[in-house]
Structure formats: structure tokens, C-alpha cells
Image (cartoon, rainbow, N blue to C red):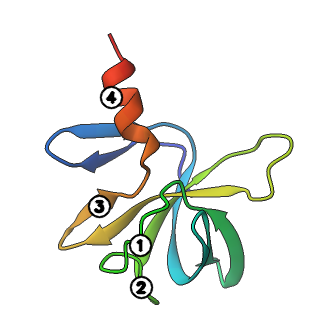
Amino acid sequence: MSNSRLWIGLPTFFEIEGNTLEGVFRKRLTRFSAKVEVGGKIVECFLPNPGRLSELLFHGAKVVLKEVFASGRKTVYDIVGVHHGGTVVSVDSRLLISLFMKP
């Protein structure tokens, strides 16, 4: 786990602030949740993208998680990226909203 900034490369770069760590994707549960192996344990994570993403999220794919602590949450981690083709690809559909909302 690191408390550094992670940059996800797209046509532009998005900064992910806060604690990030890597895990191994195991299974999609619902449109917004998945099972990920983190430190030898299987945990349920929030997936902020309802798309299928089957070409990116398959059993064994290396994913980037962001630690999120908030009251009322059922999960501790958000899946924010997945390693694909030598880069980290964003799977957080909320990032596009923040891109257009910034001054």
C-alpha cells in the first residue's frame, strides 16, 4: 500500500489521490461490485462502472484499488484501474465527470 499519487494514462492523465494498492481481480458480482484478492484475502470492492469490461476485468487481471473510508459504505476499496497492455487503464466512470467539472 502506498500513500503516493498514482497517475492513470489515457489521452490525458488523471491523478488518484489517497492510498492506493494493487490486487488481483477474481469475479464480477454485480454491475457495481467485484471480488478482488488483496494480500491473500478475497474482499468485495466497489466498481464505479456498470459496463461489462470483460476485455479488461477477467479472472487474474491485476487491478488498482483506492482505499475509501466513509460511513455507510459496504466496501473499503474502489477499483479505479486495471493493468492492460503495459499501462493502467481507468475503469472509474466518475473520473470523466471530474475532468469536465474542473476549472
Mark 2 or 3, nearer chain start: 2
- Image quarter (top left, top right, bottom left or bottom right) of the C terminus: top left
Q: Element at badge 2?
A: loop
Which label number is shown at residue 88?
A: 3
Query: Disc 2 or 1, which lies upstream in sequence?
Result: 1
Q: Position of residue 92 (x, y in %)?
A: 44, 51
Residue 34 versus residue 42 in the image, above or below: above
- Residue labelled with disc 4: 99
Nearest-to-viewer mark from 4 and 3: 4
Q: Residue furthest left?
A: 11
Alpha carbon distance from label 1 to label 3: 18 Å
Q: Nearer the viewer, residue 96 or 20?
A: 96
**Tag 1 or tag 4, which sits nearer the N-term?**
1
Q: Which residue is mark 1?
A: 52
- 45 vs 95, left or right, is right
User: What residue is drawn where x is 18% and y is 38%?
Assistant: 12
Report the amino acid beneath label 4.
Leu
Q: Residue furthest right?
A: 72
The numbered mark at residue 58 is: 2
Mark 2 → mark 1, Cα distance in angstroms? 10 Å
Question: Is tag 1's residue or tag 3's residue first in the polypeptide sequence?
Answer: 1
Crowding near the residue tagged with mark 2, few <14, some 14–19, many ≥20 C-alpha atoms within 10 Å: some
Q: Residue at x 78, y 40 (%)?
A: 70
State yes or no: discs 2 and 1 in contact (Cβ < 8 Å): no
